Image: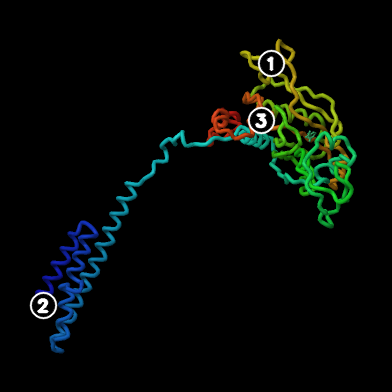
Amino acid sequence: MTDIEELKAHYLVAIDACAGLEALETVRVEALGKQGRVTALLKTMGALSPEERQVKGPAIHGLREAVTSALAARRAALENVALEAKLAAERVDVTLPVDAILTGSVHPVSQVMDELAEIFADLGFAVATGPEIEDDWHNFGALNIPDTHPARAMQDTFYLEPQARAAGDGHSPSSDGAGQAGPAPFVLRTHTSPVQIRTMMQQQPPLRIIAPGRVYRSDWDATHTPMFHQIEGLVIDRGITLGHLKWTLETFLRAFFERDDVVLRLRPSYFPFTEPSAEVDVGFTIEKGKRVIGGDPNGPGGGWMEVLGSGMVHPKVIAACGLDPAEWQGFAFGCGIDRLAMLKYGIDDLRPVFEGDIRWLKHYGFAALDVPTLSGGVGTA
Ligand code: PHE
């Protein structure tokens, strides 16, 4: 009896003294392993007389139980200590500065898109999108550009194989710009204006949206690439006037160029989908030998630069989208994003903008975590 008690006391002390999992395993094997001392005691039970077994049995089983649960408790405690140590050793300091060499940069065109979204969000505009492979009706027809209209040549584009238009979409097929008869082709959209149509067809006015995205024309020189970016703006509501258009554009351009002295000039123009239409110029001046947007365009070295096309949405366009032009009016504008980026950030050739040269990106790119905000400055170069 006493050796059982002694053995128990011995093991409980030994288990408690174990400083690591390995030591604990050694004690376990020594007690409960095949050759273990507790195992040996258990084996003796078969040879005991029934009377002896009645007395010794519970004591031996009690010993095994006590050792087993002491091992388990010590194991849990040691594992906990190991985990705590690991957590302490492997802690990540999120306040450490990131390695600047390994960071990529935000392309100036993406940066400007973010800036525009930020500015227009403040004016209550949502961002809308549309497909880059557009059908003839959305790109031209619904925008009051008939098959024979010269504007189709002005916006010469990439036509895809003529395809039968999905039956039952409610729009009559027309021939393509090359005069080929048959089902209307799909085109790579020549402007973001088809998003005006898609928005008016899908949502109920009042509407305020901007639609930034890629557009395509068959052009290629220092100031034209076959793919470029535009941002469309559209407002449809009751009682909208040219005054709303001018205020919106002025507010947008002043916020974008971060100068209160940006002045606008609206020049009468023509777009089939707006009436009246206006090209918008911004005044520039020369500061420290460099051309900057803002200041007095009539001063020395000053002048006007065209930045966008705009106008009041043509009643025919509003009607083509199933809205009553007597009730709903609006304005629209379309602006080249790449050109805005070039003007703001002093980029003089358009072609490298899309070549993806890492040296160019390093020079003109923006820090990835430096998200533009109106309060923090939209142009955080
Ligand atoms: N879509 C025209 C273009 O690409 C720009 C524009 C948009 C003009 C909206 C007026 C209104 O040239």
Q: Quadrant of residue 196?
A: top right
Q: Residues within 10 Å of mark 3 (few under 14, many from 20)?
A: few
Please tell me which residue lies in front, 329 or 98: 98
Residue matched to label 2: 1
Q: Secondary structure at mark 3?
A: helix
Q: Earlier in the sequence, mark 1 or mark 2?
A: 2
Please tell me which residue lies in front, 342 or 72: 342
Q: Nearer the viewer, mark 3 or mark 1?
A: 3
Q: Nearer the viewer, mark 2 or mark 3?
A: 3
Q: Secondary structure at mark 1?
A: strand
Q: How far, Cα to Cα, is label 3 from label 1?
A: 25 Å
Type of residue at label 1? Thr
The answer to whether residue 330 of the structure is visible from this angle is yes
Image quadrant of ligand 1 equals: top right
Q: Earlier in the sequence, mark 3 or mark 1?
A: 1
The mark found on residue 285 in the picture is 1
Relative vertical location of residue 272 with respect to residue 298 in this rendering, above or below: below
Q: Position of residue 75 (x, y in %)?
A: 26, 62
Type of residue at label 3? Arg
- Asked if ligand 1 lies within 8 A of label 1, the reply is no
Q: Nearer the viewer, mark 1 or mark 2?
A: 1
Q: Secondary structure at mark 2?
A: loop
Q: Position of residue 139 (x, y in %)?
A: 80, 42
Q: Position of residue 117 (x, y in %)?
A: 65, 37
Residue matched to label 3: 351
Type of residue at label 2? Met
Relative vertical location of residue 149 with respect to residue 204 in this rendering, above or below: above
Q: Quadrant of residue 268?
A: top right
Q: How far, Cα to Cα, is label 2 from label 3?
A: 95 Å
Q: Residues within 10 Å of mark 2 (few under 14, many from 20)?
A: few
